[in-house]
Image (spheres, helix red, strand yellow):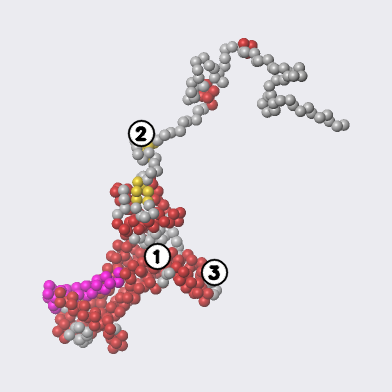
Amino acid sequence: MDTIASLFSFITTPVSWVIVQFHKVYGAIFGPDTGWAWGLSIVSLVILIRICLIPLFVKQIKATRAMQTLQPEMKKIQERYKNDKQRQSEEMMKLYKETGTNPLSSCLPILAQSPFFFALYHVLNAIANNDTIGSINQSLLDSAQKAHIFGAPLAAKFTDSSSDVAALDASLTTVRIVTAVMIVMMSASQFYTQRQLMTKNVDTTVKTPFMQQQKMLMYVFPVMFAVFGINFPVGVLVYWLTTNVWTMGQQMYVIRNNPTPGSKAQAAYLERLYKHVTHHGKTRGRGEKAIVKAIVAKGRDRNEFERKFINGLNKAGLAAQPDGTVVKSDTQVVAQTEDGTPTTAAGTPKRQQPKRQSKSRRQSGTGSAAPKAAGEPTSLEKTDQPEDAKPAAAPAKKQPGGSTRSKAQSGQRKGPQRPKSPSKK
Protein backbone atom coordinates (compact mmCIF):
# COMPACT_ATOMS: atom_id res chain seq x y z
CA MET A 1 0.00 0.00 0.00
CA ASP A 2 2.96 2.31 0.58
CA THR A 3 3.92 1.75 -3.05
CA ILE A 4 0.44 2.86 -4.19
CA ALA A 5 0.64 5.89 -1.88
CA SER A 6 3.92 6.94 -3.39
CA LEU A 7 2.65 6.45 -6.95
CA PHE A 8 -0.55 8.44 -6.47
CA SER A 9 0.58 10.99 -3.92
CA PHE A 10 0.46 13.72 -6.58
CA ILE A 11 -3.29 13.16 -7.00
CA THR A 12 -4.25 11.96 -3.49
CA THR A 13 -3.95 15.40 -1.92
CA PRO A 14 -6.09 17.21 -4.55
CA VAL A 15 -8.77 14.49 -4.36
CA SER A 16 -8.92 14.64 -0.56
CA TRP A 17 -9.06 18.45 -0.69
CA VAL A 18 -12.03 18.39 -3.11
CA ILE A 19 -13.87 15.90 -0.90
CA VAL A 20 -13.30 18.11 2.16
CA GLN A 21 -14.67 21.18 0.36
CA PHE A 22 -17.83 19.36 -0.69
CA HIS A 23 -18.14 17.91 2.82
CA LYS A 24 -18.23 21.42 4.29
CA VAL A 25 -21.20 22.28 2.08
CA TYR A 26 -23.20 19.09 2.66
CA GLY A 27 -22.16 18.88 6.31
CA ALA A 28 -23.86 22.23 6.95
CA ILE A 29 -27.09 20.76 5.50
CA PHE A 30 -27.19 17.12 6.69
CA GLY A 31 -24.67 17.19 9.57
CA PRO A 32 -20.89 16.65 9.37
CA ASP A 33 -20.94 13.05 10.65
CA THR A 34 -23.74 11.70 8.46
CA GLY A 35 -23.38 9.33 5.53
CA TRP A 36 -25.30 11.77 3.33
CA ALA A 37 -22.63 14.44 3.78
CA TRP A 38 -19.75 12.11 2.92
CA GLY A 39 -21.65 10.12 0.28
CA LEU A 40 -22.78 13.24 -1.61
CA SER A 41 -19.23 14.57 -1.39
CA ILE A 42 -18.03 11.51 -3.30
CA VAL A 43 -20.88 11.83 -5.82
CA SER A 44 -20.01 15.48 -6.38
CA LEU A 45 -16.37 14.51 -6.89
CA VAL A 46 -17.45 12.10 -9.65
CA ILE A 47 -19.62 14.71 -11.35
CA LEU A 48 -16.80 17.26 -11.27
CA ILE A 49 -14.35 14.76 -12.78
CA ARG A 50 -16.76 13.68 -15.51
CA ILE A 51 -17.51 17.27 -16.49
CA CYS A 52 -13.80 17.85 -16.94
CA LEU A 53 -13.60 14.68 -19.07
CA ILE A 54 -16.35 15.70 -21.52
CA PRO A 55 -13.82 16.76 -24.23
CA LEU A 56 -12.16 13.35 -23.94
CA PHE A 57 -15.57 11.69 -24.19
CA VAL A 58 -16.23 13.55 -27.45
CA LYS A 59 -12.89 12.30 -28.78
CA GLN A 60 -13.84 8.80 -27.69
CA ILE A 61 -17.07 8.93 -29.73
CA LYS A 62 -15.24 10.19 -32.82
CA ALA A 63 -12.51 7.58 -32.45
CA THR A 64 -15.04 4.77 -32.01
CA ARG A 65 -16.93 5.77 -35.14
CA ALA A 66 -13.73 6.14 -37.10
CA MET A 67 -12.71 2.64 -36.04
CA GLN A 68 -16.09 1.30 -37.16
CA THR A 69 -15.61 2.95 -40.55
CA LEU A 70 -12.14 1.42 -40.93
CA GLN A 71 -13.18 -2.11 -40.04
CA PRO A 72 -13.72 -3.28 -43.66
CA GLU A 73 -10.27 -1.96 -44.67
CA MET A 74 -8.68 -3.53 -41.60
CA LYS A 75 -10.28 -6.86 -42.43
CA LYS A 76 -8.86 -6.71 -45.97
CA ILE A 77 -5.37 -6.05 -44.59
CA GLN A 78 -5.68 -8.97 -42.17
CA GLU A 79 -6.73 -11.33 -44.97
CA ARG A 80 -4.05 -10.07 -47.35
CA TYR A 81 -1.17 -10.38 -44.87
CA LYS A 82 -2.47 -13.12 -42.62
CA ASN A 83 0.84 -14.97 -42.85
CA ASP A 84 3.01 -11.90 -42.27
CA LYS A 85 2.23 -10.34 -38.89
CA GLN A 86 4.92 -7.67 -39.18
CA ARG A 87 3.68 -6.43 -42.55
CA GLN A 88 0.14 -6.57 -41.20
CA SER A 89 1.08 -4.29 -38.30
CA GLU A 90 2.89 -1.90 -40.64
CA GLU A 91 -0.12 -1.64 -42.94
CA MET A 92 -2.41 -1.08 -39.94
CA MET A 93 -0.25 1.77 -38.66
CA LYS A 94 -0.15 3.24 -42.16
CA LEU A 95 -3.94 3.11 -42.35
CA TYR A 96 -4.26 4.83 -38.95
CA LYS A 97 -1.83 7.54 -40.04
CA GLU A 98 -3.58 8.20 -43.35
CA THR A 99 -7.02 8.48 -41.76
CA GLY A 100 -5.85 10.28 -38.60
CA THR A 101 -7.32 7.59 -36.35
CA ASN A 102 -5.96 6.59 -32.96
CA PRO A 103 -7.25 3.30 -31.49
CA LEU A 104 -6.33 4.42 -27.97
CA SER A 105 -8.67 7.41 -28.19
CA SER A 106 -11.63 5.19 -27.34
CA CYS A 107 -9.99 4.40 -23.97
CA LEU A 108 -9.13 7.99 -23.04
CA PRO A 109 -11.96 8.61 -20.50
CA ILE A 110 -11.20 5.39 -18.63
CA LEU A 111 -7.47 6.04 -18.62
CA ALA A 112 -7.94 9.66 -17.55
CA GLN A 113 -10.12 8.87 -14.55
CA SER A 114 -8.06 5.89 -13.38
CA PRO A 115 -5.71 8.04 -11.24
CA PHE A 116 -8.72 9.61 -9.46
CA PHE A 117 -10.18 6.17 -8.85
CA PHE A 118 -7.01 4.81 -7.25
CA ALA A 119 -6.53 8.03 -5.29
CA LEU A 120 -10.05 7.78 -3.85
CA TYR A 121 -9.49 4.11 -3.08
CA HIS A 122 -6.33 4.98 -1.14
CA VAL A 123 -8.08 7.80 0.75
CA LEU A 124 -10.94 5.51 1.85
CA ASN A 125 -8.51 2.74 2.76
CA ALA A 126 -6.58 5.20 4.93
CA ILE A 127 -9.83 6.15 6.67
CA ALA A 128 -10.51 2.45 7.36
CA ASN A 129 -7.01 2.06 8.81
CA ASN A 130 -7.44 5.21 10.95
CA ASP A 131 -4.70 7.10 9.09
CA THR A 132 -4.76 10.76 8.13
CA ILE A 133 -4.12 11.51 4.48
CA GLY A 134 -3.86 14.65 2.39
CA SER A 135 -6.35 17.29 3.54
CA ILE A 136 -8.17 14.87 5.87
CA ASN A 137 -6.94 15.60 9.42
CA GLN A 138 -7.80 13.69 12.59
CA SER A 139 -11.13 15.42 13.21
CA LEU A 140 -12.32 14.74 9.65
CA LEU A 141 -11.03 11.18 9.97
CA ASP A 142 -13.18 10.60 13.07
CA SER A 143 -16.19 12.10 11.27
CA ALA A 144 -15.68 9.88 8.20
CA GLN A 145 -15.44 6.75 10.34
CA LYS A 146 -18.78 7.56 11.93
CA ALA A 147 -20.46 8.06 8.56
CA HIS A 148 -22.72 5.21 7.43
CA ILE A 149 -24.50 4.77 4.09
CA PHE A 150 -27.67 2.72 4.68
CA GLY A 151 -26.02 1.27 7.78
CA ALA A 152 -22.69 0.39 6.11
CA PRO A 153 -19.55 2.35 7.04
CA LEU A 154 -17.93 4.40 4.31
CA ALA A 155 -14.68 2.39 4.47
CA ALA A 156 -16.18 -1.10 4.93
CA LYS A 157 -15.78 -3.87 2.31
CA PHE A 158 -17.69 -7.04 1.49
CA THR A 159 -14.65 -9.19 2.40
CA ASP A 160 -14.09 -7.57 5.82
CA SER A 161 -14.25 -9.78 8.86
CA SER A 162 -16.74 -9.30 11.64
CA SER A 163 -14.07 -7.78 13.89
CA ASP A 164 -13.12 -5.20 11.26
CA VAL A 165 -16.73 -4.23 10.75
CA ALA A 166 -17.35 -4.11 14.51
CA ALA A 167 -14.44 -1.68 14.86
CA LEU A 168 -16.35 0.64 12.52
CA ASP A 169 -19.51 0.28 14.66
CA ALA A 170 -21.55 -1.70 12.12
CA SER A 171 -23.02 -5.15 11.48
CA LEU A 172 -21.38 -7.61 9.08
CA THR A 173 -24.76 -8.67 7.65
CA THR A 174 -25.73 -5.08 6.92
CA VAL A 175 -22.38 -4.36 5.27
CA ARG A 176 -22.61 -7.40 3.01
CA ILE A 177 -26.22 -6.71 1.99
CA VAL A 178 -25.46 -3.06 1.14
CA THR A 179 -22.26 -3.89 -0.73
CA ALA A 180 -23.91 -6.78 -2.62
CA VAL A 181 -26.79 -4.56 -3.76
CA MET A 182 -24.38 -1.84 -4.88
CA ILE A 183 -22.21 -4.37 -6.77
CA VAL A 184 -25.27 -5.75 -8.59
CA MET A 185 -26.41 -2.22 -9.48
CA MET A 186 -22.92 -1.34 -10.66
CA SER A 187 -22.68 -4.44 -12.89
CA ALA A 188 -26.23 -4.00 -14.23
CA SER A 189 -25.61 -0.37 -15.18
CA GLN A 190 -22.39 -1.34 -16.96
CA PHE A 191 -24.19 -4.13 -18.86
CA TYR A 192 -27.07 -1.85 -19.90
CA THR A 193 -24.66 0.87 -21.05
CA GLN A 194 -22.77 -1.55 -23.28
CA ARG A 195 -25.96 -3.23 -24.50
CA GLN A 196 -27.61 -0.03 -25.69
CA LEU A 197 -24.39 0.78 -27.52
CA MET A 198 -24.49 -2.57 -29.36
CA THR A 199 -28.22 -2.76 -30.08
CA LYS A 200 -28.99 0.86 -30.96
CA ASN A 201 -25.83 2.70 -31.99
CA VAL A 202 -23.96 0.24 -34.23
CA ASP A 203 -24.12 0.17 -38.01
CA THR A 204 -26.05 -3.05 -38.69
CA THR A 205 -25.11 -3.06 -42.39
CA VAL A 206 -21.44 -3.85 -41.68
CA LYS A 207 -20.43 -7.04 -39.87
CA THR A 208 -16.91 -6.69 -38.55
CA PRO A 209 -14.73 -8.27 -35.82
CA PHE A 210 -15.04 -4.98 -33.92
CA MET A 211 -18.72 -5.70 -33.31
CA GLN A 212 -17.94 -9.17 -32.00
CA GLN A 213 -15.33 -7.65 -29.70
CA GLN A 214 -17.81 -5.12 -28.31
CA LYS A 215 -20.40 -7.85 -27.84
CA MET A 216 -17.90 -9.86 -25.81
CA LEU A 217 -17.06 -6.83 -23.65
CA MET A 218 -20.76 -6.42 -22.94
CA TYR A 219 -20.58 -9.60 -20.84
CA VAL A 220 -16.97 -9.39 -19.65
CA PHE A 221 -17.13 -5.96 -17.97
CA PRO A 222 -20.07 -6.72 -15.64
CA VAL A 223 -18.36 -9.92 -14.50
CA MET A 224 -15.15 -8.01 -13.83
CA PHE A 225 -17.03 -5.42 -11.75
CA ALA A 226 -18.72 -8.18 -9.76
CA VAL A 227 -15.44 -9.98 -9.06
CA PHE A 228 -13.38 -6.95 -8.12
CA GLY A 229 -16.28 -5.14 -6.44
CA ILE A 230 -16.17 -7.32 -3.36
CA ASN A 231 -12.78 -5.78 -2.54
CA PHE A 232 -13.93 -2.17 -2.94
CA PRO A 233 -14.91 -0.03 0.07
CA VAL A 234 -18.45 1.30 0.15
CA GLY A 235 -17.20 4.78 -0.75
CA VAL A 236 -15.49 3.42 -3.89
CA LEU A 237 -18.65 1.53 -4.83
CA VAL A 238 -20.53 4.83 -4.56
CA TYR A 239 -17.91 6.43 -6.78
CA TRP A 240 -18.04 3.69 -9.45
CA LEU A 241 -21.84 3.38 -9.39
CA THR A 242 -22.15 7.14 -9.90
CA THR A 243 -19.65 6.95 -12.78
CA ASN A 244 -21.65 4.18 -14.49
CA VAL A 245 -24.93 6.05 -14.13
CA TRP A 246 -23.32 9.21 -15.54
CA THR A 247 -21.87 7.26 -18.47
CA MET A 248 -25.23 5.61 -19.16
CA GLY A 249 -27.08 8.93 -19.21
CA GLN A 250 -24.40 10.65 -21.26
CA GLN A 251 -24.43 7.83 -23.80
CA MET A 252 -28.24 7.86 -24.03
CA TYR A 253 -28.08 11.57 -24.85
CA VAL A 254 -25.44 11.02 -27.55
CA ILE A 255 -27.32 8.08 -29.10
CA ARG A 256 -30.54 10.09 -29.23
CA ASN A 257 -29.08 13.29 -30.67
CA ASN A 258 -25.97 12.18 -32.60
CA PRO A 259 -26.42 8.52 -33.59
CA THR A 260 -24.06 6.38 -35.64
CA PRO A 261 -24.93 6.34 -39.38
CA GLY A 262 -26.73 3.17 -40.40
CA SER A 263 -27.84 2.28 -36.86
CA LYS A 264 -31.34 1.85 -35.45
CA ALA A 265 -30.78 5.01 -33.43
CA GLN A 266 -30.24 6.97 -36.66
CA ALA A 267 -33.48 5.60 -38.12
CA ALA A 268 -35.40 6.78 -35.03
CA TYR A 269 -33.62 10.16 -35.03
CA LEU A 270 -34.32 10.83 -38.73
CA GLU A 271 -37.96 9.90 -38.23
CA ARG A 272 -38.26 12.47 -35.43
CA LEU A 273 -36.35 15.02 -37.50
CA TYR A 274 -38.61 14.43 -40.51
CA LYS A 275 -41.76 15.05 -38.44
CA HIS A 276 -40.32 18.27 -37.02
CA VAL A 277 -39.04 19.63 -40.33
CA THR A 278 -42.27 18.88 -42.22
CA HIS A 279 -44.30 20.50 -39.42
CA HIS A 280 -42.21 23.67 -39.07
CA GLY A 281 -40.66 23.79 -42.53
CA LYS A 282 -37.10 24.29 -41.24
CA THR A 283 -34.33 22.78 -39.13
CA ARG A 284 -33.55 23.99 -35.63
CA GLY A 285 -30.19 24.31 -33.93
CA ARG A 286 -26.69 23.56 -35.10
CA GLY A 287 -26.99 19.86 -34.36
CA GLU A 288 -29.85 19.28 -36.80
CA LYS A 289 -28.20 21.43 -39.46
CA ALA A 290 -24.97 19.46 -39.07
CA ILE A 291 -26.85 16.16 -39.51
CA VAL A 292 -28.70 17.37 -42.64
CA LYS A 293 -25.50 18.88 -44.05
CA ALA A 294 -23.66 15.57 -43.63
CA ILE A 295 -26.50 13.64 -45.31
CA VAL A 296 -26.60 16.00 -48.30
CA ALA A 297 -22.82 15.83 -48.71
CA LYS A 298 -22.90 12.02 -48.98
CA GLY A 299 -24.82 12.09 -52.25
CA ARG A 300 -25.22 8.57 -53.61
CA ASP A 301 -23.36 7.09 -50.64
CA ARG A 302 -26.37 7.59 -48.34
CA ASN A 303 -27.71 4.60 -46.46
CA GLU A 304 -31.34 3.47 -46.62
CA PHE A 305 -32.45 5.62 -43.66
CA GLU A 306 -30.87 8.76 -45.12
CA ARG A 307 -32.37 8.13 -48.57
CA LYS A 308 -35.78 7.64 -46.98
CA PHE A 309 -35.38 10.95 -45.14
CA ILE A 310 -34.40 12.91 -48.28
CA ASN A 311 -37.18 11.31 -50.36
CA GLY A 312 -39.71 12.13 -47.64
CA LEU A 313 -38.69 15.79 -47.70
CA ASN A 314 -39.05 15.87 -51.50
CA LYS A 315 -42.52 14.38 -51.34
CA ALA A 316 -43.47 17.02 -48.77
CA GLY A 317 -42.33 19.80 -51.14
CA LEU A 318 -39.11 20.53 -49.23
CA ALA A 319 -35.45 20.34 -50.25
CA ALA A 320 -32.37 19.88 -48.05
CA GLN A 321 -29.59 22.38 -48.82
CA PRO A 322 -25.80 21.83 -48.65
CA ASP A 323 -25.55 24.18 -45.65
CA GLY A 324 -27.97 22.02 -43.61
CA THR A 325 -31.05 24.21 -44.00
CA VAL A 326 -34.36 23.09 -45.50
CA VAL A 327 -36.32 25.24 -47.94
CA LYS A 328 -39.47 24.83 -50.00
CA SER A 329 -38.76 22.97 -53.20
CA ASP A 330 -39.63 24.38 -56.65
CA THR A 331 -40.32 20.87 -57.91
CA GLN A 332 -44.04 20.09 -57.91
CA VAL A 333 -44.80 16.81 -56.23
CA VAL A 334 -47.80 14.78 -57.32
CA ALA A 335 -50.43 14.11 -54.70
CA GLN A 336 -54.05 12.96 -54.83
CA THR A 337 -57.21 14.52 -53.58
CA GLU A 338 -60.04 12.67 -51.95
CA ASP A 339 -61.75 11.97 -55.29
CA GLY A 340 -58.51 10.59 -56.76
CA THR A 341 -57.77 13.59 -59.00
CA PRO A 342 -53.99 14.09 -59.32
CA THR A 343 -52.83 17.48 -58.10
CA THR A 344 -49.54 19.24 -57.57
CA ALA A 345 -48.07 20.46 -54.32
CA ALA A 346 -49.69 23.84 -54.95
CA GLY A 347 -53.14 22.20 -55.23
CA THR A 348 -53.76 22.91 -58.93
CA PRO A 349 -54.90 20.06 -61.17
CA LYS A 350 -52.12 18.32 -62.99
CA ARG A 351 -52.08 18.57 -66.76
CA GLN A 352 -52.91 15.20 -68.25
CA GLN A 353 -51.68 13.78 -71.53
CA PRO A 354 -54.39 13.03 -74.15
CA LYS A 355 -55.37 9.42 -74.23
CA ARG A 356 -54.46 7.38 -77.25
CA GLN A 357 -57.51 6.55 -79.37
CA SER A 358 -58.40 3.04 -80.35
CA LYS A 359 -58.25 1.87 -83.96
CA SER A 360 -62.04 1.73 -84.34
CA ARG A 361 -62.40 5.33 -83.10
CA ARG A 362 -59.73 6.53 -85.49
CA GLN A 363 -61.40 4.73 -88.42
CA SER A 364 -64.85 6.08 -87.52
CA GLY A 365 -63.45 9.61 -87.48
CA THR A 366 -64.95 10.47 -84.09
CA GLY A 367 -61.63 11.30 -82.54
CA SER A 368 -60.51 14.53 -81.03
CA ALA A 369 -59.08 15.88 -84.29
CA ALA A 370 -60.18 19.31 -85.47
CA PRO A 371 -63.50 19.16 -87.44
CA LYS A 372 -63.26 19.55 -91.17
CA ALA A 373 -65.28 21.91 -93.28
CA ALA A 374 -68.94 21.08 -93.80
CA GLY A 375 -69.47 18.55 -96.57
CA GLU A 376 -65.77 17.75 -96.90
CA PRO A 377 -65.16 14.03 -96.56
CA THR A 378 -62.28 12.74 -94.57
CA SER A 379 -59.60 10.48 -95.94
CA LEU A 380 -61.24 7.43 -94.40
CA GLU A 381 -64.85 8.26 -95.19
CA LYS A 382 -66.62 6.63 -98.15
CA THR A 383 -68.25 8.91 -100.69
CA ASP A 384 -71.60 8.29 -102.35
CA GLN A 385 -70.30 9.27 -105.79
CA PRO A 386 -69.14 6.50 -108.13
CA GLU A 387 -65.60 6.35 -109.22
CA ASP A 388 -66.58 7.40 -112.75
CA ALA A 389 -67.93 10.63 -111.39
CA LYS A 390 -64.56 11.61 -110.03
CA PRO A 391 -62.89 14.49 -111.90
CA ALA A 392 -60.61 13.33 -114.68
CA ALA A 393 -56.95 13.86 -114.32
CA ALA A 394 -55.39 16.70 -116.25
CA PRO A 395 -53.86 15.65 -119.59
CA ALA A 396 -50.17 15.11 -119.53
CA LYS A 397 -48.04 17.70 -121.19
CA LYS A 398 -46.38 16.80 -124.45
CA GLN A 399 -42.66 16.57 -124.50
CA PRO A 400 -40.58 18.13 -127.25
CA GLY A 401 -40.09 14.73 -128.89
CA GLY A 402 -43.80 14.31 -129.41
CA SER A 403 -44.18 11.73 -126.69
CA THR A 404 -46.02 12.18 -123.51
CA ARG A 405 -44.67 11.33 -120.14
CA SER A 406 -46.67 10.99 -117.00
CA LYS A 407 -45.66 12.63 -113.82
CA ALA A 408 -42.83 10.98 -112.04
CA GLN A 409 -44.07 8.44 -109.63
CA SER A 410 -42.93 8.52 -106.11
CA GLY A 411 -39.42 7.24 -105.80
CA GLN A 412 -38.48 8.17 -109.42
CA ARG A 413 -36.36 11.05 -110.58
CA LYS A 414 -37.99 13.82 -112.49
CA GLY A 415 -36.83 14.63 -116.02
CA PRO A 416 -35.60 12.40 -118.83
CA GLN A 417 -34.42 9.01 -117.69
CA ARG A 418 -31.08 7.66 -118.79
CA PRO A 419 -31.61 4.75 -121.24
CA LYS A 420 -30.40 1.42 -120.16
CA SER A 421 -27.26 0.20 -121.90
CA PRO A 422 -27.74 -2.97 -123.96
CA SER A 423 -26.38 -6.04 -122.34
CA LYS A 424 -23.26 -7.38 -123.81
CA LYS A 425 -23.50 -10.80 -125.22
Picture quarter with the C terminus: top right
Sequence-wise, the earlier of marks 3 and 1 is: 1
Q: Give how far apart the Cα atoms at labels 2 and 1 are.
A: 50 Å
Q: Nearer the viewer, mark 2 or mark 1?
A: 1
* Magenta stretch secondary structure, dominant: helix
Q: Which residue is drawn at the image coordinates 41% and 71% (left, top)?
A: 102
Q: Which mark is residue 385?
A: none
Q: Amino acid at mark 3?
A: Arg
The answer to whether residue 320 of the structure is visible from this angle is yes
Secondary structure beneath disc 2?
loop
Image spot of residue 309 (x, y percent): 38, 51
Q: Which residue is mark 2?
A: 339
Q: Which residue is mark 3?
A: 80
Q: Which residue is drawn at the image coordinates 34% and 56% (left, top)?
A: 289
Q: Give how far apart the Cα atoms at labels 3 and 1 are.
A: 24 Å
Q: Which residue is drawn at the image coordinates 18% and 79% (left, top)?
A: 20
Point out the stretch of residues depicted in magenta. Answer: 26-54
Q: Which residue is mark 1?
A: 65
Q: Nearer the viewer, mark 3 or mark 1?
A: 1
Image spot of residue 144 (x, y percent): 17, 80
Residue 337 quadrant: top left
